[in-house]
Image (tube, rainbow, N blue to C red):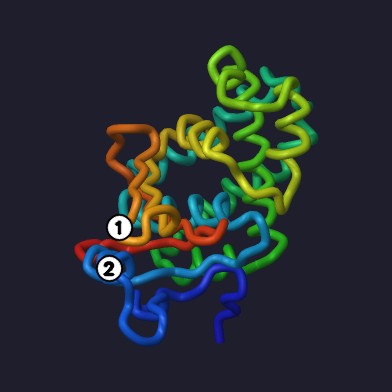
């Protein structure tokens, strides 16, 4: 049996609904989405969820998968430009490329699920995405410094972005979206009790990733037309 402790198999959206009569917000969620894939809540759920969901969405599109692979290869230059020494990220970069190659060869979500539930591989992918996010923030400091409350962007990146298990902020989501050129749709259960709040990052993008944000946690969503 597949170990799904980090990323679960898909579950019907009803698994998220509370007992009794669900609120209009939950009813709206069930109307728009058919399934959910739950991601382990260890502070890395956003990064883990984004990478899994994007790779799953392009699994049967060789051209898009190759484009993603090329971006990962080229991202090494971004990291060097941000001041990272190659030994600090090369192993994690190689792990991401290994995951992409394995998925490309298998063309099946079971391979992706198995790799993302291997703690060492999965955490290495997360660490790479954290380093890439940090590098993108720092190489575009003139823009992002306006959105980071910390006085020193480099310190913010080291303490809040690069460190494992640290929850991400909106600015980190935007940075990773830009770095990977991946559109991200976040459906938030927070706020107004009566309706969902939708965020598409960057604005106007056609997202390949749909995430549910609830109580500081991200899970992967599937639209009713997606499965």
Residue most extreme to the top: 142
* Nearer the observer, 175 or 14: 14
Q: Position of residue 159 (x, y in %)?
A: 77, 37
Label 1, on which residue? Answer: 195
Which is nearer the N-term, disc 1 or disc 2?
2
Q: Position of residue 53 (x, y in %)?
A: 43, 56
| Mark 2 secondary-structure assignment | helix
* Nearer the observer, 75 or 103: 75
Q: Residues within 10 Å of mark 2 (few under 14, many from 20)?
A: few
Q: The C terminus lies in which quarter of the figure? A: bottom left
Spatial CA span between label 1 and label 2: 7 Å
Q: Quadrant of residue 34?
A: bottom left
Question: In this rendering, would 156 be left or right of 28?
Answer: right
**Looking at the image, residue 54 lies above or below residue 193:** above
Residue at screen point 50% across, 64% down: 112
Q: Residues within 10 Å of mark 1 (few under 14, many from 20)?
A: some
Picture mark count: 2
Instruction: Verify CB contact (< 8 Å) between mark 1 and mark 2.
Output: yes
| Mark 1 secondary-structure assignment | loop
**Looking at the image, residue 26 lies above or below residue 198:** below
Question: In this rendering, would 170 be left or right of 57?
Answer: right
Q: Position of residue 153 (x, y in %)?
A: 70, 23
Q: Position of residue 186 (x, y in %)?
A: 40, 50
**Looking at the image, residue 221 lies above or below residue 35:** above
The disc placed on residue 24 is 2
Residue at screen point 46% across, 75% down: 9
């Amino acid at each position: 049996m597949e170990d799904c402790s980090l990323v679960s198999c898909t579950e019907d959206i009803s698994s998220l609904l509370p007992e009794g009569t669900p609120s209009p917000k939950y009813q709206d969620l069930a109307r728009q989405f058919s399934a959910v894939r739950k991601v382990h809540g260890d502070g890395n759920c956003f990064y883990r969820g984004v990478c899994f969901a994007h790779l799953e969405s392009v699994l049967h599109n060789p051209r898009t998968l190759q484009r993603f692979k090329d971006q990962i290869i080229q991202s090494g230059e971004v990291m060097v430009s941000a001041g990272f020494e190659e030994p600090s990220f090369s192993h994690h970069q190689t792990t991401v490329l290994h995951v992409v190659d394995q998925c490309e060869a298998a063309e099946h979500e079971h391979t992706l699920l198995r790799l993302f539930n291997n703690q060492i591989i999965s955490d290495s992918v997360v660490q790479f995405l954290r380093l890439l996010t940090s590098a993108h923030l720092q190489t575009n400091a003139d823009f992002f410094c306006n959105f980071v409350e910390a006085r020193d962007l480099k310190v913010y990146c080291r303490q809040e972005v690069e460190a494992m298990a640290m929850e991400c902020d909106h600015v980190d989501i935007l940075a990773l979206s830009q770095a990977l050129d991946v559109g991200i749709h976040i459906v938030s259960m927070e706020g107004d009790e009566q309706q969902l709040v939708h965020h598409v990052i960057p604005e106007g993008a056609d997202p390949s990733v749909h995430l549910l944000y609830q109580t500081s946690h991200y899970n992967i969503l599937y639209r009713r037309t997606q499965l």
